[in-house]
Image: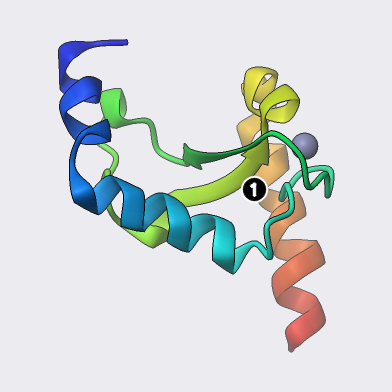
Amino acid sequence: MSRHHDQIKNDPRYKAWRAGVLERAGHACEACGSDSDLTADHVTPLDAGGEPFDPDNGRCLCRPCNSRKGNRVNIRTNYYSTRYLTHL
Ligand SMILES: [Zn+2]
């Protein structure tokens, strides 16, 4: 955890962003649907220049999915196909 990340997580906007991401996901993991041990994950990592407080750069993942998100593209695709398309 870098100093930069610590500053972001201490920012009040981070809490609002995290709450918003979990709320939008219906408090369920966007990869597997689990409702326990949820985290808010940055789609574009902060180290890669991702926006820390942009809801569009956030997604809700359970901790197991977050820790094996090497296939982040697949997770993202799954998210859109299962959540967005069913609302069209
Ligand atoms: Zn999961």
Q: Quadrant location of the N terminus?
A: top left
Which residue is pictured at 18% across the width and 41% down the height?
A: 11
With 58 as the anchor, is 4 left or right in this view?
A: left
With 33 as the anchor, is 23 left or right in this view?
A: left
Q: Estimate how packed mark 1 is, as few (under 14), some (14 to 19) or many (20 or more) residues with alpha carbons within 10 Å.
A: some
75, above or below 53, in the image: above
Which residue type carries mark 1?
Arg
63, above or below 44, in the image: above
Report x, y in % for residue 66: 63, 27
Q: In terms of image quadrants, where is residue 86?
A: bottom right
Which residue is pictured at 45% across the width and 57% down the height?
A: 19
Report x, y in % for residue 83: 75, 68
> Which sits in the foreground, 54 or 12?
12
State the residue position of label 1: 76
Which residue is pictured at 27% across the width and 33% down the height?
A: 9
Q: Secondary structure at mark 1?
A: helix
